Amino acid sequence: MHALGPFPLSCGRTITDARVSYLRIGALNAEGSNLILVPSSYGARVEDLAWLAGPVFDPQRWCVLIAGMFGNGASSSPSHGAMGLAEQGWVVDQRDNVAAQRRLLAELFGVERPALVYGWSMGAQQAYRWAVDHPEAVARICCVCGTARTSPHNRLFLLSLRQALTADRHWTGSGFSAPPEQGLLTYALIYASWAASQPFFRTIAEPVEEHVRQQWLPHYQRHDPRDLIAMLDTWLAHDVADGGDLTATLGQVRARTAVVAGSHDLYFPPADLEADARAIPGASFHRIESELGHRAGNPHSSAPEQEQLRSIAEQLLAS
């Protein structure tokens, strides 16, 4: 955990004693030129992404630094009392997470320019922010199953998750008076229906509602529901063009870029990612063929998708 002290957010609020969680795998070389930054995804703790070292990145060659975003329950989050929710004027922007990561790299590792910022889902959003806001500070970005702006259809999904939690009878307007068991179950049912693909669910032997209770609900029950809401609000706010011309904004990216789509991703359809890639000078676009849906970009237990990601990453790092 790295302490940041008072940390002003883009929304105008200040985290009094901010902290950012991190996990380093592999050694930093003398030049500091082999650092790969991996920003966390929705609901992920840094240890959840440690699987990348080995299947995707060789830890004997690369120093893989995984950084937890604000709201994930380990870095500063509503569950710590460090911040509130949008109802109280607290919204973390991805630029805030990038600012924390830049300080983490500089203050602990003496690195100003990582070799690669690699992110899946909300991690991809942060990679885009690095390239747009700090073009001199990043050599390469790899954006896996994530877009440069949250689309209208994606917003509907996120709003349905937020409504599932805040419609629970224990919601107070600023938090929960008791665990929102019904709200979390509804939330998990919605989340699962989008995160995996239709072909994937045809392979499930048990009833899908039982599958969600066993395989999905526990993942979200480990989080304080206020943290789940805070991360949703960060996702909802994401737009590297800040309401302006997205194509023109992406046209200014200087980092060598790979954009990776999942063939059956319902959150971030391949066409949306391909449009982002076309706007970035020299970007390469890749499509992972997989029935895992959105989770094709985080295949911690599926070798075929891991091999595709490793090949893409190695090609980018060699450029």
Image (cartoon, grey):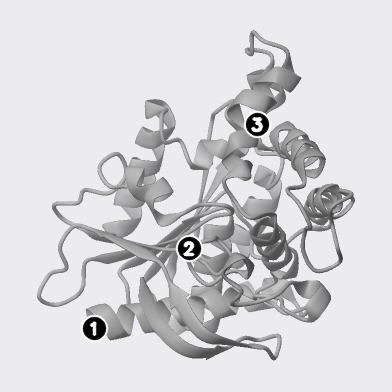
**Label 1 sits on residue:** 110
Query: Dot 1: within a 10 Å radius of its alpha carbon, few (fewer than 14), some, or many (20 or more) residues?
Result: few
Quadrant for the N terminus, please.
bottom left
Q: Which mark is residue 196?
A: 3
Look at the picture and state if 155 lies above or below 83: above
Q: CA distance from mark 1 to mark 3?
A: 39 Å
Q: Secondary structure at mark 2?
A: loop
Relative side of 249 to 285, left or right: right
Q: Is residue 275 above or below residue 138?
A: above
Q: Which residue is mark 2?
A: 74
Q: Secondary structure at mark 3?
A: loop
In this rendering, does residue 262 appear at all? no
Label 2 vs label 3: CA separation? 26 Å
Coordinates of residue 134 in the picture (x, y in percent): 48, 83
Which amino acid is tagged 2? Ala
x, y percent for residue 236: 75, 64
The one nearer the camera, 33 or 318, is 33
Residue at left 83%, top 51%? 153
Residue depicted at 69% across the width and 14% down the height = 202
